[in-house]
Amino acid sequence: MATRWGFAGAGQITHDFITALATLPKSEHRLFAVAAQDLSRAEKFAKLHEVEKAYGSYKELSQDKDIDVVYVGTIQTTHFDVVKLVLNAGKNVLCEKPMALNLKQTTELIALAKSKGLFLMEAVWSRCFPIYEEIKKEIDSGCIGEVKQIICSFGFRMPHIQRLCKKEMGGGTILDLGVYTLQLPTFIFNGEKPESVKALGYLNEDGVDLSMSATLKFKGDRMATILTSGLVNLPNEAFIVGTEGTIKIPNFWCPTRAELPNRVIEITLPTGKHEFNFPNSGGLSFEAAEVRSCLLKGLKESPKISHADSLLLAELEDELRKQIGVVYDAD
């Protein structure tokens, strides 16, 4: 039986997610219902993507008894309330990153999902790319020796994008881009919490960070250096440096290529019916497939991005914001 998807939000990221989802077999994934805060917008979106139903509120969507899982693609300041609404209605959830604005909210949502016996996953899609699994196998085989340093940068010149610049929209590079730079070292180091974090950044007039640089120190002489920016185009690649070699990952947050000491790994992404808004969005199909796989197995969290992973990411994001001075009303 196909997994029946509901979609909360009809913006650019939901467009990309549905476009990628539609590349998977219809026998496995069904585009069942979409909701927006304006019914006409939801109807227009549904018509474009051939979604079966359209709703004018997230509450109506959450109450549709035939939906198996809801993808939450609303703006990040609303994630907490929308996910809470959907979980309380008894629906499984895949929520865009960040799952919430801080560790307190993330902890509450995970506790609620557990109390309801429901599946909840933060959409850190990077972890679902086959390149990540291949890289981990190579590292575990000792191809670059012992990993001692990870370096990754993620930034684009977009100083006037409201979701990045406005505090009331959960702005700042830490939540928008930093989650990706944080998830890579925590992935390579098997969910280990760093011993210490040191961060610096520049804030705009609204009090959110438009650039951030941080160093994470792990036990055993291991370090990670991460950079984010909304002011300049950074290299947007990662290096995993071991005692016997280096792995380079272009577009590390959605990689189709990894350069190892002795070979290159490459994958091909599916092409959607509609044009994507963001780079390599065809890879969102890997994330959707992971959700279905977990649901079929009766899992309540994904082993690729577990609840513990989401809690650690939220804790580290909180620490970075604290050191730089970014404070949200939700804090």
Image: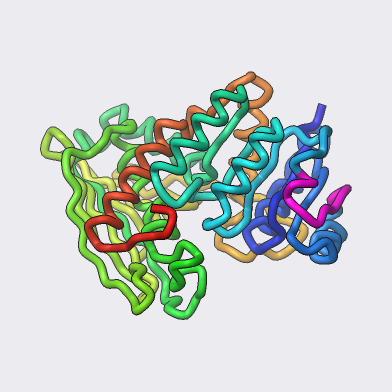
| Residue 155 image-quadrant placement | bottom left
**Residue located 33% across and 51% down the image:** 248
Residue 57 drawn in magenta: yes
Q: Which residues are magenta?
A: 51-61
Left or right: residue 66 versus residue 7 is right
Which color scheme does this rendered protein use?
rainbow
Between residue 86 and residue 257, name the one nearer to us: 86
Question: Quick check: is 108 in the magenta stretch?
Answer: no
Q: Nearer the viewer, residue 313 or 286?
A: 313
Say which residue appears at 46% left-offset and 71% top-offset: 166
Q: Is residue 105 above or below residue 13?
A: above
182 is higher (above) or lower (below) than 207: above
Q: Is residue 211 left or right of residue 171?
A: left
In the image, residue 94 above or below residue 18: above
- Give whichever of 261, 148 is nearer the camera: 148
Residue 5, by quadrant, is top right
Q: Is residue 255 visible?
A: no
Would you say residue 301 is visible in this rendering?
yes
How far across and how far down the image is residue 259, in percent? Answer: 37, 49
Residue 222 place in picture, x, y as percent: 16, 40
Count of marks, rendered view: 0
Q: What x and y, as percent, mark residue 245?
A: 22, 43
Toward the top, the furthest residue is 298
- Where's residue 251, x and y in %? 44, 57
Picture residue at 54% right of the left edge, 44% below the top: 123
Extreme-left residue of the structure: 221
> At 60% across and 34% down in the image, what residue appears?
290
Q: Quadrant of the N terminus?
A: top right
